[in-house]
Amino acid sequence: MEKKEIQQAAEAEKTTEKIWKRKHWHPVISGFLILAMAISFFFLLFRFEDLCAKISALISILIPFIYGGVMAYMLRMPCNFFEKYLEKWLPKKLKKRAGGFAILLSLFCAGLVLYLLISMVVPQMAASISSIVTELPGTAERASEWIQELLADNPVMENYLQTAMEAVNTKIEAWARKDLLPMLMSMVDGFAGTVSTVVTFLFNIFIGMVVCIYVLGSRKLFARQAKAVVYSIFRPRWAEAILNEVNYADKMFVGFFSGKILDSAIIGLICYIFSLILGFPNAMLVSVIVGVTNIIPYFGPYIGAVPSALLILIVDPIKCIWFLVFIIVLQQFDGNILGPRLLANSTGLSGFWVLFSVTVFSGVFGFVGILIGVPVFAVIYDLIRKLVVMGLRRNHKLELLGTDHGGNERQDRRQAEKTGMDTET
C-alpha cells in the first residue's frame, strides 16, 4: 500500500510539474514565435528585392531539375502505360526490367514525335522563307502598279499619297541610321553572349533529361516518401485531405493538358487537310502554327491566325481572306463541338473564369502562366468551393447550394455530408 501511495504521489508530482511547465512556458514560446514572425516579416519587407534576387539565383541553379521534373511529369503516363503492359507480356526473368524498358520506350516515343515535328516544320519553314524572299519584290511591284492604276484618274489623291510616301521614306532612312545600325552593332557585339545562352540552354536540357530518367525510375519511391512525410506531419484526417487535393490537382493538369494536346492535334490535322483542298500556300507550316497555338486557352486561335494569315497574304491576298473565314469556322467548331467533348468536365470552369485565369496568370507569370493558368485556377476554385461548403454546413445553410457551372450540387452536398461525418468522428 505504501509503494502504491508513493507511486501515486510521484505521478501527481510529475503531473503538477508538467502543468506548471505548460502554464509558464507556453506563453514564453508563443511570445518568442510571435516576435520571430514579426522580425521575419520586417526583414522580408525591407529586404524584398534582395530576397527576390536570391530566389532568382536559386531558380537559375535549379533550372535543370525544373526541366527534368516537367519532362518526367509529362512522360509519367506513357511510362506507366508501357510498364503495365510490359509486366504483363514479358517473361518472368525480365519482369524486373519492365520499368527500365518503359522509360526507354517513353523517351523514344517523345524523341520520335519531336523529330517528326521538326522534320515537317523546318523544311517547310525554310521553303516558306525562300518563297517570301523570292516573291516579295514582285508582290511589292504589283501592289505599286495597282495603286498607280487606282490613282491615275485622281491626281489630288496621287499627290497626297506621293507626299506621304516621301515622308515615310524619310522616316525609314532616319530610323535605319539612328536605330537600326546601332541595334545591329549591338547584336554583333552580343553574338558571343547569344552563343553562351544557347550552349547553357542545351546543357540544362541534357542535365534535365538525366534528371528525368532518375525521376521516372524512382517515381514510386518518391510518391511513397512524400506520402510518409505528409502523414508524419499532419493528423490522418488532414493528411488524407491534402493527398486528395494533390490527386485532384494532378487530375486537373493531366486532364487539361492531355485533352488540349489531342484537341490541338485534331485541329492542326483538319487545318492541313482543308488547306490542301482549298489550295492555301504554306499548308504544313500554317497548320502547325494553328495547331500549336491552339494549346493556349482562349487567346490561342487569335495568336495562331495572325502569322498564318500574313504568310498567306504575301503569296495570295484573296486566299488570305478565305483563310480567315475558314479559321473563324474552324474555331467555332472547336469551341462549340470538338473542345467541349474532349475537355468535358476537365476543369469545371465557366468561360468567364477561363478568361479571368488566363488574363491574370499571363500578366503575372508570362507565357508559362498562359499554359498553366486554367488548371491552377481550377484547383484554387475547388479549394474555395470546399471551404464554402464547409461554412454552409456549419451554419446550416446547405439549401443555398445551387447548380454550379458544372452541375456540382450533388457533389457539394456529398462533400458537405462527408465533412460533417469526419467532424463528428
Image: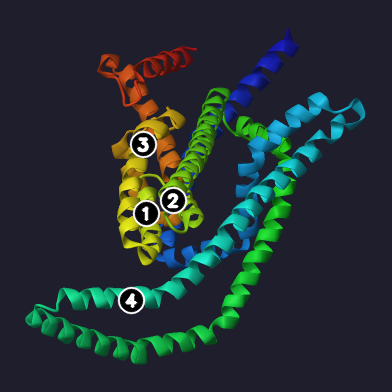
Res 191 label: none
Q: Residues within 10 Å of mark 4 (few under 14, many from 20)?
A: few
- What residue is shown with label 3? 333
Q: CA distance from mark 2 to mark 4?
A: 27 Å
Q: Nearer the viewer, residue 238 or 178?
A: 178
Q: Amino acid at mark 2?
A: Val
| Residue receiving disc 4 | 140
How dense is the environment of label 3, judged by Cα within 10 Å: few (below 14), some, or many (20 and up)?
A: few
Q: Residues within 10 Å of mark 1 (few under 14, many from 20)?
A: many
- On residue 290, the disc is 2
Residue type at mark 4 is Ala
Q: Identify the amino acid type marked 1.
A: Ala
Q: Residue at x 62, y 75 (%)?
A: 196
The CA span between labels 4 and 1 is 23 Å
The residue under the point 46% across, 12% down is 421
Disc with the residue nearer the chain's start (3 vs 2): 2
Distance from Cα at disc 3 to Cα at disc 1: 15 Å
Which residue is denoted by mark 1 in the rendering?
A: 305
Sequence-wise, which precedes: disc 2 or disc 1?
2
Residue 209 percent coordinates (x, y)? 70, 54
Task: Look at the picture and state if 63 lies above or below 261.
Answer: below
* Residue at the (66%, 62%) spot, across then down: 204
- Assign the N terminus to one quadrant of the image: top right
- Picture quadrant of residue 168: bottom left
Task: Work out whether residue 30 or residue 236 is closer to the camera in this orientation and state it.
Answer: 236
Q: Amino acid at mark 3?
A: Phe
Q: Of discs 3 and 4, which sits in the foreground?
A: 4
At mark 3, the secondary structure is helix
Residue 137: x, y in percent? 38, 78
